[in-house]
Image: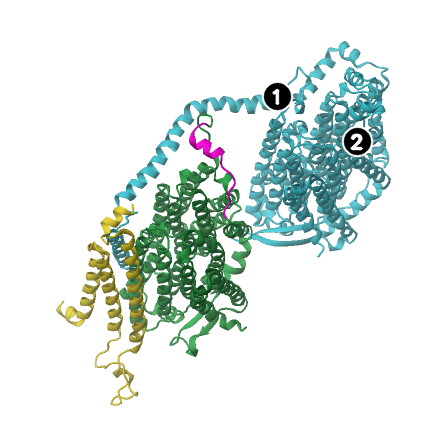
Chain colours: A cyan, B yellow, C green
Amino acid sequence: MDTLFAWLCLIFPLTGVLATPFLARIGPAFRDYGSVFFSFLTAVSAMMLLPLLLTPEKLPLETSYIWLDTPIRVNFGVLLDTLSIVLANVVAVISFFIMVYCLGYMKGNSSILRFWMLMNGFIGSMLLLVFADNLLLIFVGWKLVGVCSYGLIGFYYRDEKRYWIGGPAPFKFDPPSACGLKALMVTGVGDMFMLGGILIMYYYSGTLDVMALYRTAPEWIPRMAAAPGMMILVSVLLIAGPVGKSAQFPLIEWLPEAMAGPGPVSALIHAATMVKSGVFLVARLVPIFYYGYWVAGSPEAMYFFVIVAWIGAVTAFIAASKGLVALELKKILAYSTVSQIGYMMLAMGLSGFRQDLLVHGYTAGVFHLMSHAMFKACLFLCAGTVIHSAHSIYIHQMGALRHYLPFTWVFMTLAALSLMGVPPLPGFWSKDAVLLVCLESQHYMLFAVAVAAVICTSFYTVRLIGMVFYGRPSDHIRALEEKYKTLEEKRAHLGEGYLSQTSACAALTIGIVVFSIYGLRVEHMLHDLFADNLAHGLALPTVDHTAAFPHLLAPVLSVVCVAAGAVPAFFFYFTGTWSVQTVFQRSNLMKLIHIFLWERWFIDRFYSWFIVGGIRRISVFVARICETFLDTVIHRKMPGVVTHGGKALLDSIHADARDLSNNIAYILATAIFFIVATVWWIR
Amino acid sequence: MLELIEGYYAYFFLILLFLIGLYGMMIKRNLMKKIFGMSIVQTSVILFWITSAFKENATVTVFDPGIGLENPDLYLNPLPHTLMLTAIVVAVVTLGVSFALIIAIYRNYGTLDEPRLLERTR
Amino acid sequence: MNPIQIPLLIPVTFLFASLLTPLAGLLGRSWAHLVSLAGAVFVFFLSLKGLGAALAEGPLRYYVSGWLPPMGIEFVLDPLAGFLEVIITGMTVLVLIYARKSVEIENPDKAVPFYTLTMLLMTGLSGMVITGDLFNLYVFLEISALAGYALLAIGGKRAPFSAFRYLTLGTLGAGFYLMGLVFLFMTTGTLNMADMSRMLPLVNGSFTVTTGLILIILGAGLKMGLFPLHTWLPDAYTNASSAATSLIAPVGTKVAAYIMIRMLIISGFPPLIELLTWVAAAGIIAASILAIAQSDIKRMLAYSSVANIGYIALGITLANPLAFIGAMLHILNHALMKAVLFFAAGGIFIKMGTRDIFQLRGLPKKMPFTAGAMLIAVFSMVGIPPTGGFFSKIYLIFGAIEAGTWFFVAVILISTLLNFVYFFRVIQTSFFKPYENGGTTDDDVKYESMEMDEMSPGMLVPTLIISVVIILVGLFNGAIVDKVITPGHPWFSG
């Protein structure tokens, strides 16, 4: 009965997809409000699941129907446990606010029908991924999410110049359709690896069902561990999927370009939901590998956690450092998203390092996921409004916008402070939890990298806020002020967006404030829930944690780091006491670092050169030599042989004869053939 | 060899009948004659069944007061006879339908010669 | 109503409907249509109920006039028969809905005979499925065949001639069946199916029995159009009216295939079964190639039917559970897909005036819904998930793998490729034919001036219903296999 709401969560958005074209026939208002209404219903259904968290002894709940029976049994079902309920609420509620924002943001777009259908389709597939009770269904949702995201990134597929991303002028631009393709392909690489991992796991376990995998772990994990290297292989393959989807280190490069989509899309997909699915999947897999290391005693299982943790830490730092020099508003936010997801991955990876850290790390990851979803969605929505009013995607063409966008200024500043980790905002609580786990694990390298990322984060966040809302208006803004002389015009073109936009941002900001008050309590609640889920429900061995360091060390350190990044940025960009230009001109080292960061550590360059360029070089060879040959054989000769030759053969034996004597001759021949052959057989 | 023919001569005649029917269906050009051939084939199958009811020293399956009911071995197997009544009805109906079709063909094309019909319906 | 009477009621209702339809026809064509439709709908619900009862309580048996088997005739509705019965009666209902308008346009003066013959045909087919007596099966076979000859003769000028050839070959096939039956009767002395299957192992391997079985299987093969006994099929399907084709193509051959299943189950799979597998495989490839050679859409579909009958025969004769499930699922799927395709072909002929597949340009512009339904059916034919055809093919492939016969796996895959070729020719001309010379040729001008002109709702609705069902079958094939086919399986039920 309780799973009914989970089914509704899947049914409502998909109904929305199907209903939108019909609603569009009635009228534009029905179309817009109708599709938002469906996401509202989804959010309500998701929230109806929250009471289940108060009775954790009832979880996990599962309802499933047989989808495929033979040769492999696959169910179509929903699995309700703490993780899926929490994540579903994050997805459904935040996406509802984003849909509300879209009411204003997308007003007047000619392809809005496609937009609504893709958005609802995205929400539905994301919830399918969250609720799915087996790995195959998770994969289906995973790919559907990817496809919807492709459609939304390339939403302006006509590639008008104003939707291009990249630059400014001397640097290269990317049209949205290319960006969509890039996202699809890069994540696709990870997905294929992941499918391989799932299949290997199926080979050993004989089931795809998540609960069954947990339950039967004592049987199949020793078998898998017996094959040398198999655990490592499976770990690498399975991590590749989340790495692609969450834009982690080797597959990091698609997310910045994904900002080519409409603003709210970036908020929904590339901040709040889709990129979190990688963390979600890792969280689903943690119990399996934890069991493998701590119970089954396979040393190879530890590689899963080591890889995840290091990927997370390295990504957190790389992405944050790129954010230091970026000029496009949404790209800075994209880098920061990648970097924050790195923290979540780090926490997930740390959860397997020691028995006492399992619940702490797991909780920290999920908790950071929740708080990050909220403030990053708010940041992106505000960024949409800012870009709209400043008529530019570059922060150096903004400045002093707080006069025109007073509400957005408040919202965005609050969200940015949360991102930095300023107490008592939710970002502080969650990031502090991650850092605490990292410190307690006594892996100081990881901790150092994570702390460096915190410094970068606070620097670029302050820089962002300073360049957008403070300082002096840039030439671009002045030109706009010249253009729109009267107050009304200024308000219309430079001011706040539609009411629905502002209210959506406001709602998220209120969420941040509420979360900051209850943050610690939420964390404790999550901790208890996961302790119940992992230690009791799944019977994973844990030990009670005893702090190795003073309790206040981590919070104090993190506040100090925030200040270390924020103070110089404050003098550079708020007060203008220090000049960026001077620093840049004075030192050659600065210039080199700047180029290195501006080129994004040359990772993208390398991929373009190695993969894209390499494929092009191979393609020349293939086109000239292989293709001509294969084309002749496969497209000319073989069909000729099969169809013409086969037809000639059949004609020669009159297989489509129309006169009776031939037909009867056939029957007799068959009869005689059968009898002779059977008699021969029997003998 | 001679015993084989002597003991199963009925079957040889039936096979001959079957083959005559097939010959008619295959070689004759006129559709009407093909129907005759088809009918002969059906008849041969029906007779096959009747033959299967045969027993030595038995009489037809009509109640005979002289024999009585005590010894059923003295009657032929009645089941094939009754079944073949149905089969004969089926054969007659088939004949009726085929004649109806032949009339329709003749109306449409004015001939019943198969090669010509094939030519015209190509 | 007592479910025990359902096996009798199914054919009897059709029989009565066939008597009432011409009487109702005296009042008017629509009355005849209504009576036959009412009969079909009634029987559809009866068979659903019967299937439910058979699944819940085991086979329903009805002893005609109280004579117990093996002496008397029994009607048996086991899950397998119920499954077939639901398919064929369901298709009949939809075809009758479609037929009203289609017959009205194509052969208005033959409407009443059409409905009457449909009912008679269904009497025979449903009786064949349900009977437990081998001679009774012959009688029903001939009832359905005679009605079928007459039905296929309703159509254009050529229809009687192609129906005539079907008649001669069909009668020969029935003769084979009867001839084979006498061999079995002579050795076992019984005609009851259950009794026969108990007797046959005692005399298995005898030359008489083997010959009899071969003749019976040849007879069934002729009726189902198994290559190389298919030669009557393409002409008969091409020349008949579209309503008649869309009734007989999905339903008629499937029931003949069902006879083959029954016979193979009864006989306990003699050695000739491996031979049949090879014949079926040859048929799949040969018929697909012949389909590529056609340019008339109905003729192409007819050859594709032959190929698909080959799939079904292949699945039956591989003789393992997975392949059997594949065959049963393919009976369902093929009935659905062929119905949609023949429905669409009929509608296209009415609205666009052509059956040449190279003249179908602009189909999606003129008849978008028909084109959509056809696209789904084509996807299913080729085997693109999530349509039903994909799953039946995958079961067949798994069955072939389980049998260890990789050659047949290759045959299925190659035939999929050939399917792709002949179906996507249609899709390509109708959907994607490019402009030549910048859109100035006559063809392009004609295409530009096309307007939407969809077939009438009475014909469109059944088409769309079935195309939705195709997808549903694909999505819920697990449930169908689990709940219906597996219990009906001769090896599973034990």
Give the residue pinned by disc 1.
A605
Residue at 77% x, 9% y: name it.
A586
C272 lies above or below A510: below
**Callout 1: 10 Å neighbours few (<14), some, many (20+)?**
some
Residue B16 visible in this rendered orientation of the protein:
yes
A329 lies above or below A584: below
Q: Quadrant of residue B23?
A: bottom left
Q: Quadrant of residue A38?
A: top right
Relative to the observer, which residue lies in front, C231 or A303? C231
Q: Residue furthest left?
A: B2
Left or right: where C367 falls relative to C207 = right
Amino acid marked by disc 2 = Leu
Q: Which mark is residue B24?
A: none
Please report the bounds of the magenta region as a residue range: C440-455
Residue C210 visible in this rendered orientation of the protein:
no
Counting from the top left corner in percent of width and height, residue A69 is at 54, 53
Which is nearer the N-term, disc 1 or disc 2? 2
Q: Which mark is residue A419?
A: 2
Left or right: where A56 falls relative to A614 = right
Q: What subunit carries mark 1?
A: A
Relative to the observer, which residue lies in front, C326 or A660? A660
Left or right: where C370 falls relative to B32 = right
Counting from the top left corner in percent of width and height, residue A440 is at 78, 36
Amino acid marked by disc 1 = Arg
Counting from the top left corner in percent of width and height, residue A249 is at 66, 29
Q: What subunit carries mark 2?
A: A
Task: State which quarter of the image contains the N terminus of chain C.
Answer: bottom right
A198 lies above or below A187: below
**Callout 2: 10 Å neighbours few (<14), some, many (20+)?**
many
Residue at 82% x, 21% y: name it.
A569
Helix, strand or loop under label 2? helix
